[in-house]
Amino acid sequence: MFSLLFGVLKAIVSAVFKVVSLLFKMVYSVLAFLHIRLLALYLAVCALLSLFLPVFGEGIAYFWAGLGVCAAITLVGWFVAARRALDARPRKPLREETAAAESAAQPASAASSQPAPAPAPVPPPQPAPQRYPVYYDVEGQPGYFFAEYSDRYELYRRGENGAEYIRSDPKR
């Protein structure tokens, strides 16, 4: 009976923590989107301090000074975010730039009365021949490496007596 009661209580507490966690994540995402995390944190800490400790009785000027600093930092954060958004936007060319480019292209084609020769076909680049074996370290396993051949992979372990062969897998 006690284990059943404990299991139900544990499930209820777990569900409450998950809901509270989800709410905190949502609030944090909104604050991060608006770039007001520091300001909200400052106001929350000041509210908790004023509830439990009489810290702002005579020193209320400190509260306003801290609020001003946090507001200034928030405004700078908004400015930086807006500047980054503007810099990341693709820039359209000005009308003068496009007109200058068009006028520069027209006299070159009008100057020659004969058609331009067709460009010579460019052969496709040939891949460099692969030299085998190629050795790679195994990610997450510092004591292992594998060798790549044209038709297979071979796994090795680094040992005191050199490399120890483990197995070979064919390429697909």
Image: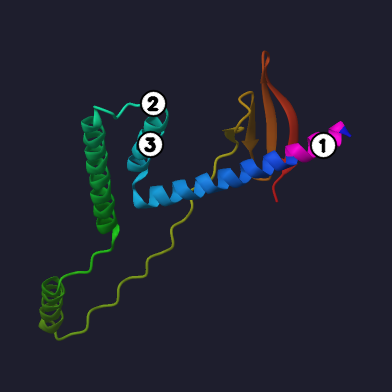
Residue at image location 69% in from the left, 47% down from the top:
171
> Given the image, on which type of amino acid does mark 2 rest?
Leu
Q: Which residue is mark 1?
A: 5
Label the magenta part by its dominant secondary structure: helix
N-terminal of the two: label 2 or label 1?
A: 1
Image position of 18 with respect to 165: above or below: below
User: Mark 3 vs mark 1: which is more N-terminal?
Assistant: 1
Residue 153 coordinates in the image, percent (x, y)? 68, 39
Position of residue 86 relative to residue 75, above or below, is below
Q: Which residues are magenta?
A: 2-10
Q: Residue at x 63, y 34 (%)?
A: 147
List x then y, in percent, for residue 21: 57, 43
Gap in angstroms between the C-alphas marked 2 and 1 = 39 Å
Task: Judge from the rendering whether residue 118 lies leftward or rightward of residue 33; answer left or right.
Answer: left
Snapshot quadrant of residue 55: top left
Q: In the rendering, at what x and y percent does residue 74 appear?
A: 27, 44
State the residue position of label 3: 47
Extreme residue in the bottom direction = 113
* The quarter of the displayed image where residue 101 is located: bottom left
Q: Tell me the distance, in whole angstroms, between the alpha carbons under discs 3 and 1.
A: 38 Å
How many angstroms separate mark 2 from mark 3 (CA)? 10 Å
Decide: is 113 above or below 30.
below
Q: Which mark is residue 53?
A: 2
